[in-house]
Amino acid sequence: MSERLRPRDLAFLAMESAATPMHNATLEIFDPGESGFDYQRLVELIDSRIAFVPRYRQRIQTVPGRIANAVWIDDSRFDLAYHVRRSGLPRPGTMEQLRELVARIVSRPLDAHRPLWEMYFIEGLADGKVAVLAKSHQILVDGVETVDLGQVLLDTGRELKELEHDDWRPKPQPSPLSLAAGALHDNLREPETLVSTVRSTAQSGLRSAKAGWDRAGAVTNALANRRPTPDSPISAELSEQRRFVAVGTRLDDYRQIRDVHGGSINDVVLATLTGALRTWLQARGTSSTAMRQIKAMVPMSVIDDELEATSLGTQIAPHLVTLPVGEPSPVVRLHQVSYAFAAHQETGRGVAANRLAGIAGFAPTTFHALGSRAAAEQLGKGFHIAITNVPGPQFPLYAAGAQMIETYPVQPLLPGQALAIGITSYDGGVYYGVTADRDALPDASVLGQCIVEALEELKDSASDARPRAPRGRKKAAKKAAKKP
């Protein structure tokens, strides 16, 4: 029997529009070296690993009369060459050219009549490097039934692991009559299926009605020559096009700041972003009052002992934090960010970075997708930006013998939010991927430079300061000081 889409998946589909395509993406840059890594090798690699993620060969099929939620079925026309595409940059193959290509690709929605993913092999980068851009719909990667395809493609060594031959054949496509019969059977045997269908249909109707009211309000404002007032400097009505900014930094810099000022690497990353947003907003002439109102949804990894530890989708919880962009001191900003996350760590459910980084495969692609799902589900909580920060392994990974040297998350924009940021640490680097609306934030590249400057500001504050002793050593020192 085919698996039905859950109500939360249908909510993501209903939220999607040309201005808000609901897919995540990852940009990875490789040094082929002597591996011979090219488009054909990538196709062969995916063909040998796709069996680990069966959902990537399935598509959505609606039920006649919508008497039950849609189902996942095998795509009888599955064509790997359609999903894995070849592209190239003109000379000189700069990072700026690559970012522009990425922005154009992620602006396009996925084809809803096929499996909801695409992957691009991009040639022509400077110094002989190549890039792979993968994008997958949010309902495809749930961390329960399916992890991201990118998680299973990378190996810890140059030697390509030989796996058993995959003799997959699509199951016959169900007829409309069998789909309807299956829906009636599920409704009778499992009352929760009927409840889920009614709820999904009602929610879809409410969303359609709300969209109608929103459009009517926009027309009224236009006739009155008024525009809706944004509730933050990064709130806007979205266009159908995106900008993408990639910033690479070194992990040792964050460790140095953490060792001096305390907190965690995550705290230093968020403080760096806060400082970057502050400088960028000031350069845009944003008022100090507006700058105090930026709230971020930062999904955090947690441990839930009541649920299966292998279910990654149960290990992400939303965390709302106000970014102190109004604070002029970089050190005070860092302490304020650390305090905001202290409560999460004190619950005992926080997951250590080395535990996340040790999950099999390249887990950041999956965790970024789960983080963006968690943020989308909290859209009504009044935040202005979604930020996902995922630690990856601190050793090199390889695709068919080619070493991955950089990796950048490309997060989707939520309705009304013109900016989203993802961060991945990997093999000694910390890589920021900034997604922005093309029309609302034409100066998004300036934010990228502000990230570099904000990190330098924190480094300067740490260079003259004394390293902070670990908590245990500080307590011992205090006790020793009290002894005669």
Image (spheres, rainbow, N blue to C red):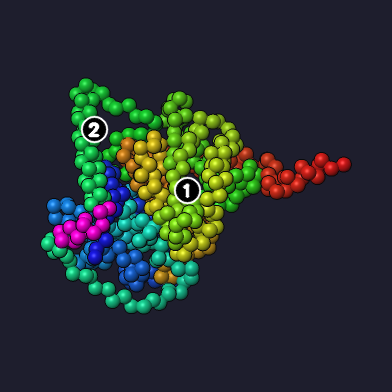
The residue where tag 2 is placed is 214
**Chief SS of the magenta region:** helix
**Residue 269: % across, % down:** 52, 45
Q: In which quarter of the image is the C terminus?
A: top right
Q: Where is residue 339 in the image (x, y as percent from the top left)?
A: 57, 38
Looking at the rendering, in which quadrant would you find the N terminus?
bottom left
Which class describes the residues within 10 Å of circle 1: few (<14), some (14-19), or many (20+)?
Answer: many
Residue 230 appears in which quarter of the rendering? Answer: top left
Q: Mark 1 points at which residue?
A: 300
Q: How far apart are marks 2 and 1 (CA)?
A: 32 Å
Q: Which amino acid does label 2 sit on?
A: Asp
Q: What element carries label 1?
A: strand
- Residue sitting nearer the eye, 233 or 310: 310
* Element class at badge 2: helix
Residue 135 in the image: above or below residue 158? above
The residue drawn where x is 36% and y is 44% is 377
Asked if residue 162 lies left or right of residue 270, the reply is: left
